[in-house]
Amino acid sequence: MLWKDKYEIGVPRIDAQHKELFSCVESFLQVLRAEESWNEKIPRINETLEFMKRYVVEHFRDEEEYQKSINFPEYEYHKKIHNGMVKYVQEVSRQYEQSDNNEYLMQQLGGRLLAWLINHVAAEDQLIADYAKKKGMSGND
């Protein structure tokens, strides 16, 4: 599994969402790598894409609410990163739908999601945890 406990930021709801995102991306990559034909993969690819479009927005909203609740000084910067990823997922989804289920677009999305998720959760989100710890706040504050 791609998830590592060191990615936890100490906020149960956010950590659970991160785990679910990692699980979803991992499943998505497994579908992309499966040996069945592309047409057989399309229903699961579409399902994952719809989930990602909804869930990423929900997760980012929750994470941003937590950042505001602790007065995280990098909130605006972090929100811009989130907004960029939402736009990317929406744009790739739009292109995919218009391209009649282009496999190459989904391969690109899979790679980018994996790299982004690991880099973002392992680096950017850890800054939130570090700030909360420095301020003496627990993840439940």
Image: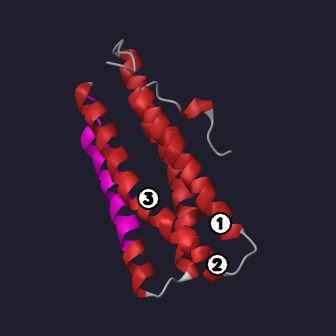
Residue drawn at the location 41% of the way across and 31% of the way down: 13
**What kind of secondary structure does the magenta stretch mostly adopt?**
helix
Q: In this view, does 141 lie above or below 31?
A: above
Query: Which badge, 3 or 2, is on the more N-terminal residue?
Result: 2
Q: Could you tell me which secondary element the residue under label 1 belongs to?
A: helix
Q: Which residue is nearer to you in this view: 118 or 106?
A: 106
The residue identified by callout 1 is 31
Spatial separation of the CA atoms under disc 3 and disc 2 = 20 Å
* The C terminus sits in image quarter: top left
Q: Which of marks 3 and 2 is in front?
A: 2
Q: What residue type is labelled 1?
A: Val
Query: Which badge, 1 or 2, is on the more N-terminal residue?
Result: 1
Give the left or right position of residue 74, taking residue 96 as reference.
Answer: left
Q: Is residue 87 magenta?
A: yes
Whole-percent x, y for residue 138 in the image: 39, 16
Image: magenta residue range: 71-91
Task: Please say whether residue 108 is visible from this viewpoint.
Answer: no
Q: In this view, does 9 lie above or below 18?
A: above
Query: Which badge, 1 or 3, is on the more N-terminal residue?
Result: 1
The residue identified by callout 3 is 52
Q: Which amino acid does label 3 sit on?
A: Met
Whole-percent x, y for residue 89 in the image: 40, 65
Residue drawn at the location 33% of the way across and 52% of the way down: 57
Q: Which residue is nearer to you in this view: 20 or 74?
A: 20
Q: Which residue is nearer to you in this view: 139 or 34?
A: 34
Task: Please say whether residue 18 is visible from this viewpoint.
Answer: yes
Residue drawn at the location 52% of the way across and 44% of the way down: 20
Whole-percent x, y for residue 4 in the image: 63, 36
The residue identified by callout 2 is 40
